[in-house]
Amino acid sequence: MRLIVKISCLLFFLQSFSQTTSNQEKIKNYIDTYFNYDRESIHVQFNKNIYVNSEDLAFKGYVWSKNNNTPHSNTANVQLVVYNEQQEIIQKQLIFTTKGTFAGGLHLNNKFKTGKYYFHFYTNWMNNFTEDGSFMQTIEIIDKNEPYNFKTKEPDWDTAKITLSPEGGSILNDINNAVGISIKDCNQKGIETDGIVLDSKSNEVSQFHTNKMGNGVFYLIPNLNEKYTLKIKSDKLTIAQPLPKVQETGIIVTYNNNLPKNKLIIAVKTNEKGVELYQNKKFILLIQQNKNAIQQEIVFDTKETEKTLLFDKKYLSNGVNSIRLIDENLNEITERLVYISPVNSPITTLQAKVVANDSIQLSGKTELNQASLSISVLPENNVCINQNRSIQGTFYLNNYLDIPETDNYAYYDLENKERKQDMELLMLNQNKSKFLWDNIKSNPPKINHSFDKGVTISGKVEKKLNPNSKNRISLVSLKDNVFDEAVIDKNNDFKFENFFAQDSTVFVLQMINEKSLSVATKIEARVSPSQTFFSLPLQFDKTICPTKKNLDKSFTFSVSKAKDSIINLKEITIKSTKKDVLKHQKEMNFMATSFKVKEGDYGRFLDFLNRNGYRTGLDEDGNVFISVNRGFTGGNSGSPTVYIDNDIVLDNNLLFNLYMNEIDEIYMDKSGNSDVVSVGNGTIKIFLRENLKKDYYDIKYTSLIVNKGFAKNIKFKNSQFETQNEFYYFGTLNWSPNITIKDNQNYEIKLPKGNQKEIQVLLEGFSDDGQLVSETRRIPVSNP
């Protein structure tokens, strides 16, 4: 009989062991499948957060590989969509990305009225996944024609709301429960306060304090038959809220993340009732971030209400990790989040001193190696800095939180001595990660969206071709040093894929035959794809309640004294003069107006025409048009005939990227009497400088102006303010988006001094091996 019992026990053990092994293997397969495809996430640093609508808005973007925790070097295309406060699209850009970074910006103008604007960055690849990896930044823009009221930092006490987060999802009877408490106003601004917990007889059984982020914790050993009330009473806030009903039993996961030697201890707890319910049932404790996962089996015996496990954090990923308790049916019982801080954080040193010509030299050094940084420098009294986000907060924190913590800089601020404790409270008050277990188990990603790299230039030739011929299309842009070829298939189609093409670039296409000779034919060409959509719901920073303004502190911008009397011409002004020698004047009718272009002059030729009696632009098909303004001879608004070096221009697209510094002389005859080709619409003759390569203008071609390509990066300029006080409040001293660090080298930035005794420096970046840095500092300016 004893032998039978032993064999039965052995069989039960082997069966259980087999089941556990099988479940662990299934869990591993679930995770490997769900996280098989690498995900991108984006962080963007703006040079500041509040702008006057006469300034340049600039940004630097960083793209992260979640699977590798390093820069995502394969990303090429990032989409930007800008929304106004009514969530209407006002602008789109396709931004070129290389080595995991991109830079760009906007020239603001009077079209940007006072209000909030939302800048949304994403990639087409992100549309394949349930979890949102995009980046949304709220920017405030100020109209200089309106007074500006500074906003108070006080929360809206009248709309305070309490959220409770028990460790196991519910408060369990007769054991010590840690209950997270979060208090925020209607705009999700944290409220710092104190409070107590009372039983039904008004006895104080616990107390708590919430930090500046609004997070806190209280501990409670409850009675199943008792009712508890949370109470806050202060000068600014009075709240009484009942606690959820105490549950008879359940399971809690808790941990200690502050042990020496980089250790993490996790406890799985239940009460006496739970021991009876869960006796001999096997659970799997899973610690996981992306594909990195550790599994450990747990079994409650007849006497234990708590199981503890010790882990070395060097095997866990930096940032938020999920601790899940999985039952025998592979269902999730509960989840806790734990934050693993990097063992070593790179140290950055910054020093500013006055140098020659009344400028400041900012010198920096960082322990990052092979890194890309971006730095914004603002005046000491600048009010446009509201640094509440950090690159660590995006990649280590919000990549994994179900409810992103937008104001996350304080959790990484080296001057915040309580940042580690603040992070622990945040983890307690986040109920779950954005990666849901049910999705991991049964809803792996389906890849329906491409990983875009560049754009595609495609089209068709009109000429009927021999099916066996080997004709090809050449694509040329001399200005951008582009020379490429593609075959023409049997359907007369051609395609240039993964192509870097900026907006406003003029490409020349021509057909080449087997003998490498150009063949005249009509060619249709287009750029694709256009802007791709974002399939997930957008997380706008919605203002539920009005932002309180400090009515005692407002600012009114000065009106420019020269506004009504002086017109600032951004482009060049060219005047006809008899002193300049005009080489081709005798070739023109006496009614023609002549212009000698000086070598130092710059600007676009089409803009020059706009200032001299013509209208230019792009028509609905994206082609350049030139028309005569009404009011000239004959009142005709048709297109004039244009010549370059006495060769007629059959395609006006050629003129799109023609600049004044390439031109020697211009003649405009609006009467149309200078040549027999023009019929009443006038003549424009352009003579190029002798040293210019004229092959670009002589070839027989079809031109294509890119209008769905990559946005051109702006050349950032500091805005001119009417008063020094305006500049100190709202201006930017320096924006340096592309600082490259190699071998821990130093870097230097020069900026105007003014009366600065100290400057504000915003620095962010990452290294090739995945180290992150994000700092905001006030740096004193020393004299030599």
Image (tube, rainbow, N blue to C red):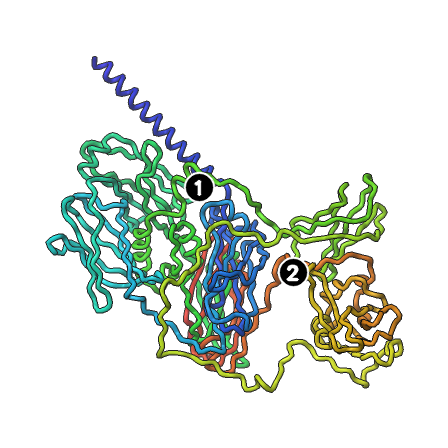
Instruction: Residue type at mark 2: give it.
Output: Asp
Task: Characterize the local packing of mark 2: few (<14), some (14-19) or many (20 or more) Cα atoms within 10 angstroms.
Answer: some
Task: Give the percent coordinates (x, y) of residue 58.
Answer: 53, 66
Quadrant position of residue 285: top left
Residue 661 visible to the viewer: yes
Check the image and report above or below for 82 versus 591. Answer: above
Check the image and report above or below for 76 versus 632. Answer: above
Can you identify the residue that label 2 sits on? Answer: 503
Foreground residue, 735 or 646? 646
Task: Determine whether label 2 and label 1 are within 8 Å by CB.
Answer: no
Residue found farthest to the top: 1
Can you identify the residue that label 1 sits on? Answer: 291
Quadrant position of residue 16: top left
User: Image check: 700 left or right of 159?
Assistant: right
Q: Secondary structure at mark 2?
A: loop
Between circles 2 and 1, the one closer to the viewer is 2
Q: Earlier in the sequence, mark 2 or mark 1?
A: 1
Check the image and report above or below for 663 versus 131. Answer: below
Instruction: Residue type at mark 1: give it.
Output: Lys
User: Image check: 199 left or right of 352?
Assistant: left
Task: Give the percent coordinates (x, y) of residue 768.
Answer: 51, 53
